Amino acid sequence: MPLEIDISQLSASELDELLAKAAARRAIVEPAHPTEVPKPDKAIVNRQWFTCLVEPGSLFQIRHPGYGWLAFVIPPNERAQLLSLLLNQALLTPQSQSSATAPSVSGGTTVH
C-alpha cells in the first residue's frame, strides 16, 4: 500500500520534524543504504560548512539544502587520513584532476 502524505501544506518546521523522524526510522530499516560512494553527478555543491574540535575528535557540519545542517564527528585517526587525502587533492594540478570532481572550497573554523 503506497503511503501518500500531502506535504504541500506543511510549514518549514513541520517538514523539518517529518524529515528528522523519517531519517531516524530509515536508519534502522532494512535494506540499509548502499555503502558505495554516489556518483559525482548526484553530489550537492554547497559551500556552507563548519568544523571545530570537540572531545572525541573534529566536528564537521555541512549544510544540505533539503536536510539542513548534518553533523559528523571525525575521530583523530580518521581526521589524519582525511587530511592526507585532501592535501593530496589540493596538490594535484587541474589537468590531473578528473573532470567529474566537485569544485573545491576553502575552510576553517567558521561557516563557509
Image (tube, grey):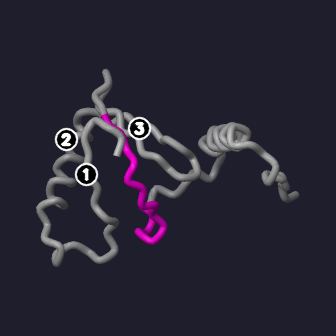
Residue shown at the point (16%, 59%) measured from the top left: 90
Visible residue check, residue 68: yes
Residue 15: % across, % down = 70, 44
Tell whether position 53 is magenta. Answer: no
Residue type marked 3: Phe
The region drawn magenta spans 37-51
Query: Of marks 2 and 1, which one's residue comes earlier in the chain?
Result: 2
Alpha-carbon span between mark 2 and mark 1 = 18 Å
Secondary structure at badge 2 equals helix
Query: Of marks 3 and 2, which one's residue comes earlier in the chain?
Result: 3
Residue 84: % across, % down = 16, 50
State the mark number for residue 76.
none
Alpha-carbon span between mark 1 and mark 3 = 18 Å
Closer to viewer: mark 1 or mark 3: 1
Mark 1, residue position: 106
Tell me the quarter of the picture where residue 73 sits: top left
Residue 102: % across, % down = 34, 66
Residue type marked 1: Ser
User: 92 and 78: which one is in front?
Assistant: 92
State the mark number for residue 80.
2
Tell whether position 47 is magenta. Answer: yes
Residue furthest to the right: 1
Instruction: Tell me if residue 88 comes above or below residue 48 in the rendering.
Output: below
Name the side, left or right, on which 21 lies relative to 72.
Answer: right
Mark 3, residue position: 72
Visible residue check, residue 25: no
Q: Count residues near mark 2 (Cα–Cα under 10 Å), then give few for <14, some for 14-19, many for 20+.
A: few
Name the side, left or right, on which 79 lies relative to 111.
Answer: left
Tell me the quarter of the picture where residue 56 sits: top left
Residue 30: % across, % down = 64, 49
